[in-house]
Image: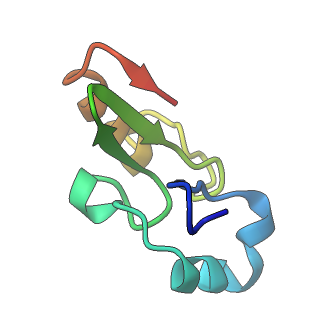
Amino acid sequence: MAAYYPYMISLGNHESSYNYTAFKARHEMPGQGSGGQGNQFYSFDHGLVHFVSMSSENDAAPYAVGSPQYNFLRAVCTKFIWQLF
């Protein structure tokens, strides 16, 4: 299927073994280039739509005010009208 259809992935609790080493080694998402953090959270454009991928696994409080993911989401949300999470 991956040879025929584009897809993007998100970090989940099943990848937590060994500090997400296997997940990080196998998948290259646009994290750093989008202002995100590696493969953990990121965003990208496809046509007129801006997609955002968040992680519930990267911090003890991933959505806490002032966390890297919170700051990333605030920055992304101020730039676009239509977004898909």
Spot the residue most to the left. 79
Q: Position of residue 4 (x, y in %)?
A: 56, 60
Q: Where is residue 61 in the image (x, y as percent from the top left)?
A: 59, 46
**Residue ID at (52%, 74%):** 27
**Residue ID at (65%, 56%):** 57
Q: Which image quarter holds the N terminus?
A: bottom right
- Compared to residue 28, the image places residue 6 above or below, namely above
Color scheme of the displayed model: rainbow
Answer left or right for 5 relative to 15: left
The quarter of the picture where residue 13 lies is bottom right
- Compared to residue 68, the image places residue 14 above or below, namely below
Q: Position of residue 49 (x, y in %)?
A: 33, 27
Q: Position of residue 46 (x, y in %)?
A: 32, 38
Answer left or right for 51 relative to 85: left
The quarter of the picture where residue 31 lies is bottom left
Towards the viewer: 16 or 34:
34
Spot the residue most to the front. 4
Answer left or right for 1 relative to 45: right
**Residue ID at (62%, 59%):** 11
- Compared to residue 2, the image places residue 7 above or below, namely above
Towards the viewer: 23 or 13:
23
**Residue ID at (63%, 54%):** 60
The quarter of the picture where residue 22 lies is bottom right
